[in-house]
Image (cartoon, rainbow, N blue to C red):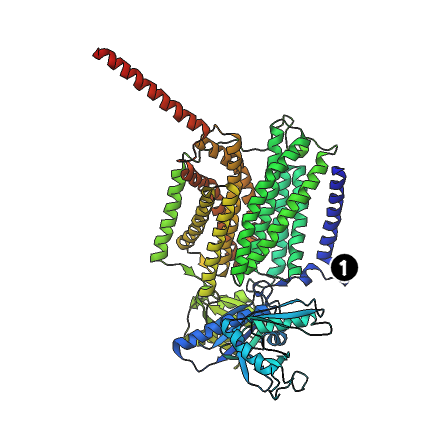
Amino acid sequence: MRNKKNIIVVVLVLILLVVSWFTSIFGIGGKVGNLYEQMKFGLDINGGVYVLLEAETDEKGTEKAKVMEQTKTVLENRVNAMGVSEASVSIEGDNRIRVEMPGVKDAEAAIKQIGRTAQLKFLLADGTLVMSGDEVKNASLATDSDHGGYKITMDFTGKGADLFGEGTEKAASGSVTPTLMDENGNLVDSTAIVIMLDNDVVSAPTVSQKINSTSCEIYRGNGGFPEEEASQLAALIRGGALPATLTEVNSSVETATIGANALSKSVIAGFIGLGIVMIIMLAVFGVLGLIADIALALYVQLILWLMVAFGSVLTLPGIAGIILSVGMAVDSNIIIFTRIREEITKGKSIRVAVDMGFKSALSTVIDAQTTTLIASIVLYLIGTSSVRGFALTLMIGTICSIITAVFVTQSFVNVLADSKFATLRAFGMKEDGTPNRSWKHHFSFIKNRKISYTISICVICAGLVFGLFKGFNYGIDFTGGTMMQIEMGQKVDIEEVKDTIKSYDLEPTIVYAGKDNTQIVIRTIKALKSSERSEVINTLDQKYNLKDDAVLASEEFGPTVGKDLRHNAVKSIIIAALCMLVYIRFRFKTWKFGLAAVGGLAHDVLFTLALYAIFGFTINNPFIAGILTVVGYSINDTIVVFDRIRENTKFYKRKQNVELIDDSVNQTISRSILTSVTTIAVMIPLFFMVSSEIREFLIPLLIGVIVGTYSSIFLCSPLLYDLTRKESLSRYEENKEKSDKERMKKKKAQNKRANDGIVK
């Protein structure tokens, strides 16, 4: 009966696999587009629209800077609330804001999406101000069970609740003479609370009594609001009030910052990397590797189509999340297969070994994936911009990894175990019951832990010295710089442009812009004076014979990775670490495992920063993805090792701690290395086949994987030993200590009797 269910699952999975891959490549009869058509891509991958807005404010100096920061923050919330996720908002000069909108090809359509930039107001029917939009904490849509359809719920600040109460009391009295008109040109009802944005009435719901509460609902009788209308209205309301009015200065369509045609190259490189991983799994695990490859092929489909379903935007940090989750999906299968092999090595039959292997591997897989899932949820809830992009893909990937490993892989392996093909060779074993390839070396990690400690301390201290005296190499995302947008009159070769202006030592980022890519946008970290910009433009003019009005924009711009984003990322990582600490305490019944794991996590972040300081790697937007990769990968790898230590503690109670921890690390080291190799294998084709911008992006990911593997093997387990050795003596050690004390006591008694005899 069990095998019949497994066969049904296998058949359904194979059908789903074929249909999903066919749909991803070709679509379905014009009704469902292929994956490329359905997926939303970030500005860094697929290009998009940027809009330059100018703020009108009378503030000066620091107050003006504060207004611009507030405007930027509110605009980010508003753009994201209106469905343009992963938008990049940055301050240029002292009164301009640039909004980059990924995946949008029509500049005019983009402006319509963010054009409503004036202050949001709540008014009485006669135009009397009730309150501004910044008194609204949140607005969302909900199902309207009373009237059908949907309704909008609003939450107010304390001040907002008081103002709204006063306004609704006056409106409900019917004493207001309406002067405002709705979107259809009709006077609003005298009892209406008018919601106005950009001098347009977006809604005018009526009230029948004073609403004295911190929340309220907007509903419509006779069927309620349609979902789309309710969603748009809620998005406009929760967008917040802008401290300054914005007007459009310039807009354009830009190509990807990772280089032209980078997306198609990345897809090809991704397939090659996936193929390398599949070949590695086949070579190491045989038929089991083929099962892992099937599960991995399904996993890729699940994660990409779920991203489409959630409407998420794929950006470079998102790719980092996918790469990391692919590594962990393979890791789950490696853990399961390794456990099955261990049971076969112990002399169990294949059928029993499969059952025992899955049973013992399940807790490890769940613990490792859950800690990563906790981190991704916290990063998503607290993080912003690229942090959320990374977190969402990692979250989806982690869930898909659990599904494919626990259900898909298990069903396939069970069918194999009950079939006539269930031979030792099929499970990657020799005829004598030993693995074809196994880790035969045994290292003394605890005995040599001081070497690991010394290496880590030296690298981190060296990084501290370099960071203090040499400083970090901050990229344009962190520092801002100078921007020049030029109409070239034709599509030019970007590498040729770089070569033309190389004497100015700008180290620029250059992308295409405008219709037919006839414009270029040059960004450099250097703050160029007006005369210096003119020199660069004159050099380009000599080469390309530019028109008189070729310079469309020439100005300074602020960092896209501002202080808020940096502080938010740090806060997210700290809270995620604390949440993981609590979970590990709950699962492992002691704080020591959690402290060792979080200690290793802190080490990995500091180690990565040190390497950036020592080697002068550029710290830019991808760096955040790299640090987040360290968080996700490090904790996952460490939990696998700790789970084996916990298990061995139960079964080998007479072993000394040194021997027990060393055995546990040696038992899992092949799995740690293999997982790292497969994760890095996904990156290698990207590194060599795509642009230099992609290579710059992959550096922090490679560092994250390598450092995470190093710490889980050489650092976290020794930390655990040092935290537990004084209070976690094994039963063998306790008995030995007890017998030594009794022996000493007897010896003292004998000596006393002997001394007593001499005195007599």
Judge from the rendering whether residue 291 lies leftward or rightward of residue 639; answer left or right.
right
On screen, residue 481 above or below 417: below
Figure quadrant of residue 345: top right
Residue in front for this viewpoint, 211 or 466: 211
Q: Where residue 631 appears, x then y in whole percent?
A: 50, 51
Figure quadrant of residue 616: bottom left
Q: Where residue 134 appears, x then y in whole percent?
A: 52, 74
Q: Where residue 717 appears, x then y in whole percent?
A: 46, 39
Q: Amino acid at mark 1?
A: Ile
The residue that label 1 is drawn on is: 28
Label 1 sits on a secondary structure element that is loop
Residue in front for this viewpoint, 369 or 287: 369
Residue at 76% over, 43% down:
8
Q: Where residue 260 appears, x then y in whole percent?
A: 59, 64
Residue 161 appearing in the image: yes
What residue occupies the far right of the structure in this picture?
29
Residue 539 appearing in the image: no
Which corner quadrant holds the N terminus?
top right
Residue at 41% over, 60% down:
473
Q: Residues within 10 Å of mark 1 (few under 14, many from 20)?
A: few
Which corner quadrant holds the C terminus?
top left
- How many discs appear? 1
